[in-house]
Amino acid sequence: MDFIQNLGLGFSVALLPYNLLFCFIGCFLGTAIGVLPGIGPLGTIAILLPVTFGVSPEAALIMLAGIYYGAQYGGSTTAILINLPGEATSAVTAIDGYQMARQGRAGTALAVAALGSFFAGTVATLAIAIFAKPLTSLALSFSPADYFALMVLGLVASIALAHGSVLKGLAMILLGLLLGCVGTDSYTGAMRFTLGTLDLADGIPIVAFGAGIYALGEILRGIENESDAPVSVIPVNNRLPSLADLKEATAPVVRGTLLGSVLGVLPGGGALLSAFTSYAMEKKLSRTPERFGHGAMAGVAGPESANNAGAQTSFIPMLTLGIPSNPIMALMVGALILQGIIPGPNLITEQPKLFWGVIASMWVGNLILVILNLPLIGLWLKLLKIRPHFLFPTILGFSMIGVYSVGNSAFDLYLMAIFGAAGYVLGKLDCEPAPMLLGFVLGPLLEEYLRRAMILADGDATVLIQRPLSATLLAVAAALLVVILLPFIRKRRKEVFVEDE
Amino acid sequence: MFATYWPSRRNMVFGIVFVSFSALMAFETLRKLPIGTPANMGPGFFPLLLSISLGAISILAVVFGQSSAQEEPLKVAPFRAVALVLGAPIVFSLSIDPLGLFFAVFLSVLFSTQASIRSKIGESILLSAGFSAFCVLVFIYLLNLPLPLWGWLIAG
């Protein structure tokens, strides 16, 4: 029982008062931004990234992690009480959670969401502790071709997230990869697409990219829907769920937890994919699927557990392989690099305190979050009283300071404005930003491993399918692509023929 | 057979934007970057591969995309609001060096508040000033970020 010892080491780090304080700050901020629409974990972590330079690496990562999974808790609160998901991952929760609240079961829905998340967080913490070490040893035997195949699979999987056109999702990935090429080529030192300016020599800064696309994009969408109607919050009545409620929620929570834990590990996975998949699964499995959309408990319990489990296990590829599986993990990698630590298979042996401390802190953080979210829910609802036209300028202000402080570069703010405009236009063209951001993050790594694999194989492209692991991963990616493309093309053909008649 | 089919206007715009962007990137790559060979890829190999694929996928997306018959009306924020929100980072960028953090935040936030139809100028000034003071307190005094409080124009 090696992992119990390791977890012991982790808790001894996580429970140090200093780290505990940062864990609390992270969870507190995470809940706040989860409740507030318009600012998400990506923007917040981006803003705090430069701040983490001044604290120890453990405290930095513990706080940033708390923001990510804390946002999953906060997001469900607004989804349930005002039908406004504070966080993209809570969009599914809003469907049935809000209906439950309207039927006078707001307290039950909130409690089930929080307790389900806590259960999921506990299981995910254990899962990371158990599987991290074997995965790390496995990762050490990965060849460049395997890494390449793994990332391709992650990218393809991320399209499953994007609703709407699969082909547009693919185009967004390629666009992201292409934008990731901007900057100095690591092999030859050649400047690529830098438009002759040194400001782009290190590539497009991810914070400016993310803040432009997400923060500015969200604000503009908010202004579109501006109305004078005050936000109506459904009062929370019965706080505790009955035993029957808990019994009803148990199976969806367990299923959501397992699903989220698995999907979180996938590159490209994480909280969002887990929540959507869990909702679809619960609806399929339910004996009363017609209740979904009208206040089905499983529609809250499943996705809420899944998104928290997914948020946590998405740390696995980052901590063990050094591959960020989503943009948020890319920022975590950035935080580690700021501290002079390169994440990868060696992290676990070189920085055991950091590695296990962060994992143990997740369980501590989940405990803090249950306390923050259940008894203190009234406090968070006060945040919603802030009028949107006061809120968005402050969110914008924080984002601008965040973008500027990463490199003290005024140029980065122009990039933020440009990507804000691009993000808004792309949204109007029915293009989802998530696959693009993932492509942008993985692009440099993908190219690096492809080039390395081709050098080793002397230009023989079949190297990518010669090893069993990479061949399997690529085959799965190809199969996945076919599965999501086929119904799409068939539907289109049907539409064409229908129009003909 | 396909006489009634025509891509939606949104998809036409998508196709034009994406195909021209990929063509531009491919052209730039071919003009400036060595491609190399598969065994020894140059800096241009991956970008060229990507831009060609992007062009091809974009065309497919238009062909298999929504037809004009299904198009929903487009909802866009007023131009004034878009310009004010996107202009805020530019105001910040222009003012941070000469005026420093306090005024950069104050000016850009005040600028962006005008995007909302519900903002009143008095309230907005109060909000921007309060928020700027808060940011100075948190980021400069509490977190010690190396940000200039006053720029060269003020501090000399």
Image (tube, helix red, strand yellow):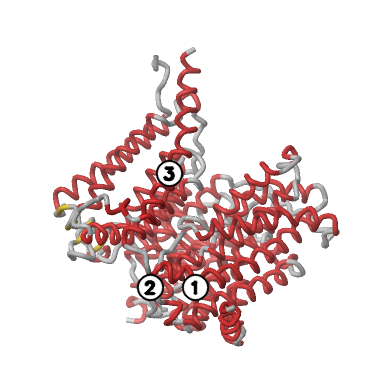
Q: Which residue is mark 3?
A: A169
Q: Do we see residue A389 in this rendering?
A: yes
Q: Residues within 10 Å of mark 3 (few under 14, many from 20)?
A: many
Q: Give the chain of mark 2.
A: B
Q: Position of residue A7 (x, y in %)?
A: 59, 79
Which one is in front in this view, the residue at disc 2 or the one at disc 3?
3
**Rendered-image quadrant of the C terminus of chain B:** bottom left
The residue where tag 1 is placed is: A133
Sequence-first tag of 3 and 1: 1
Q: CA distance from mark 2 to mark 3?
A: 43 Å
Q: To which chain does the residue with label 3 belong?
A: A
Q: Indicate the position of residue A257 as horizontal and vertical percent values.
A: 64, 59
CA gap between label 1 and label 2 equals 52 Å
Check residue B99 in the rendering and tell me which mark sits there, or answer none: 2
Rendered residue at 71%/47% (across/down): A96
Q: Nearer the viewer, mark 1 or mark 2?
A: 1
Q: Where residue A220 appears, x then y in whole percent?
A: 50, 50
Q: Residue at x 78, y 55 (%)?
A: A106
Q: Is residue A401 visible?
A: no
Amino acid, disc 2: Leu
